[in-house]
Image (cartoon, rainbow, N blue to C red):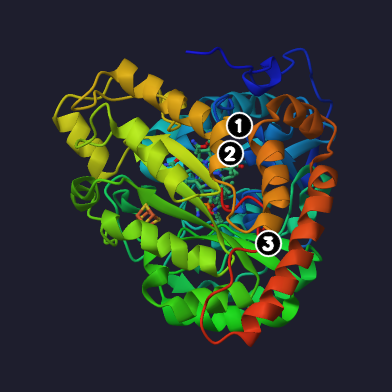
Amino acid sequence: MQRLWLPRAMRIAPALDESIRPDIVRPRYALLINPFYPKDPHASFGKHVLTPSLALTSIAASTPENWQVQYWDENLLQGPPPWQPFPEVVGITVHLTFAERAYALARWYRERGSKIVCGGLHVLSCPEEVRPHCDALAMGEGVQLWGRVLRDVEAGTLQPVYRGDYRHPYRDDPPPRRDLVPDDSFLTTASLIATRGCHNRCGFCYLSTDGLQMPYLTRDVEQIVDEFRATGQPYGVFIDNNLGSKPEYLRRLCRAMRPLEKIWSAAVTLDVTDDPSLVREMALAGCTGVFVGFESLQDENIVAAHKKSPRAEEYARRVEVLHENGIQVNGSFVLGFDHDRPDVFARTAEWIERNRLECATFHILTPYPGTPLFKQMEAEGRLLHRDWSLYDTGHVVFRPRHMTPEQLADGYAWCYQRLFSHKSIWRRRPREARAVLPYLAMSYLYKRSNWLWYHLIRHRLTATAWRGLVEWTRGRHLRFRARLQMETVPGIRVSGVIVPAGV
Ligand code: B12
Ligand code: SF4
């Protein structure tokens, strides 16, 4: 296999200087940190700066007025996190892949006098592991907890555990503090969230984690429209698990967003295409791309994961419905299911090319702790280790049924190499001639420029690099939309929108 370029700064977190000794801790100052994680050299580095996570900006919005708050994302390659002034409280979001880095940060700030509060997915699935590293665990929904945590710090009554409930209606939540994120560092800082949860509970998805009760809840469409408008950004990304779980809600949201004349992308399941009129509403509202979890082209895998999804033989027709409405498809495929054999890699890549998916992401099947898949693998003695840093969907952490771990790792790498190759990019070009150029511009910038991304990220030039393409896309989309509006039956081919869809 070809050795891929991965600069040190994208592989190893910045060193924490042990010699630093702050004179004083600044009272009522909180620092929120999104920890570093190593990047997968097979995929695009650009992926990490498309749109920021809303985890910390959401909780920042409930900071009491007498507190000052700062946000630091270690993945923006700006060196070690700030320590002047020295924070009284450090809030860290913890996912399993960067848990070790989160603990190192916690230790460093704690030893120097900060109170450490940890929240996020890993806190929910492995609370006992996280507990010794912090002063307070925030389990579950954090917006309702953060203000309370800070008030308790002030009163000297900080509790060891706080529990937030995902069943509380979150229309009352304040909008995320997007202003805390450096807007030159991302394609867009308009990360939006309209719904929580998903109508499915696939056995491999974090949503099926033991003890996580996350019903499908929606926010008022007017709130979303107001937030999107207030970002001032032409392009927004819905980071919802599945924006399409309630089709009638999605339809209302689309109608409300249409007058904004902005473009956006979202993750949806393929059943949004059950009703082509909904897909058209999405297009008319500015949807230029969807991120679809196809997961597998083999029905047995989908059934075993308990995913309610159209049969694989129907995927192609449904992709066409999206394409006819000018919506690009970024397909997500999981490799290593129990019914996958060594031919899965070539079959998947060929299918993607045949159906001209503009983008695709691959994930090695990964049993997240607390999920039914994890329990199954553990019971069958198939887990190779519990080094969470490798549970990042880019490494094989279990024994596959019909191939060796090495075959799975090589097949994964091969899929990315093939899909990012000149030949494959060309094969997947849109059928409409005038859409080819923007498609190629996006593909080459996104998929073949990791050396460039490294510099763009470090010098905070991400937004600048994308700006022209985003405006070009929006202009093309508005013209396409005008034509679509005049039609009664879908018929116009893809407009060739160019912004990568989904994360
Ligand atoms: C945006 C996003 C990204 C972005 C940014 C990631 C980042 N860390 O900065 C990008 C595109 C870079 C990305 C990359 C990846 N991602 Co991602 N990503 C997401 C996504 C779509 C949205 C995250 C978000 O904003 N959620 C909304 C916020 C509000 O929810 P939240 O994070 O749970 O936070 C709430 C609480 O947990 C709590 N909370 C969280 N932190 C804290 C801290 C404190 C102090 C407190 C008090 C509370 C608190 O309060 C918050 C508000 O309620 C999620 C899916 C999803 N919808 O959540 C996947 C998701 C987090 N990603 C996932 C994965 C697997 C990855 C990748 C590994 C995939 C890959 N192979 O490329 C990579 C690499 C990241 C890594 N190594 O960890 C998985 C994680 C699974 C797991 N069990 O850990 C998710 C859940 C997707 C999925 N369905 O599987 N991702
Ligand atoms: S459809 Fe996607 S978001 Fe929903 S449960 Fe399955 S994997 Fe998770």
Secondary structure at badge 3 equals strand
Q: Residue type at mark 3?
A: Gly
Q: In the picture provided, is 427 more to the left or to the right than 210?
A: right
Instruction: Identify the residue under disc 2.
Output: 425
- The mark lying in front, picked from 3 and 1, is 1
Which of the labelled discs sits on residue 236, or is there none? Answer: 3
Residue, x 62% and y 59% (percent of image)?
432
Residue, x 29% and y 49% (percent of image)?
210
Q: Residue type at mark 1?
A: His
- The mark lying in front, picked from 2 and 3, is 2
Is residue 410 positioned above or below 429 on the image? above
Q: CA distance from mark 2 to mark 1?
A: 5 Å
Q: Provide residue 23's location: percent of width, then percent of height.
A: 84, 26
Residue, x 25% and y 40% (percent of image)?
373
Q: Residues within 10 Å of mark 2 (few under 14, many from 20)?
A: many
Label 3–label 1 contact, CB within 8 A = no
Secondary structure at badge 1 equals helix
Q: Residues within 10 Å of mark 3 (few under 14, many from 20)?
A: many
Q: Residue furthest left?
A: 380
Q: Earlier in the sequence, mark 2 or mark 3?
A: 3
Which of the labelled discs sits on residue 289, or is there none? Answer: none
Q: In the picture provided, is 369 more to the left or to the right than 1?
A: left
Q: Nearer the viewer, residue 85 or 186?
A: 186
Secondary structure at badge 2 equals helix
Is residue 350 positioned above or below 231 on the image? above
Q: Provide residue 68's location: percent of width, then percent of height.
A: 80, 51
Q: Quadrant of residue 446?
A: top right
Instruction: Identify the residue under disc 1.
Output: 422
Q: Residue type at mark 2?
A: Ile
Q: CA distance from mark 2 to mark 3?
A: 25 Å
Label 2–label 3 contact, CB within 8 A = no
Residue, x 59% and y 48% (percent of image)?
429
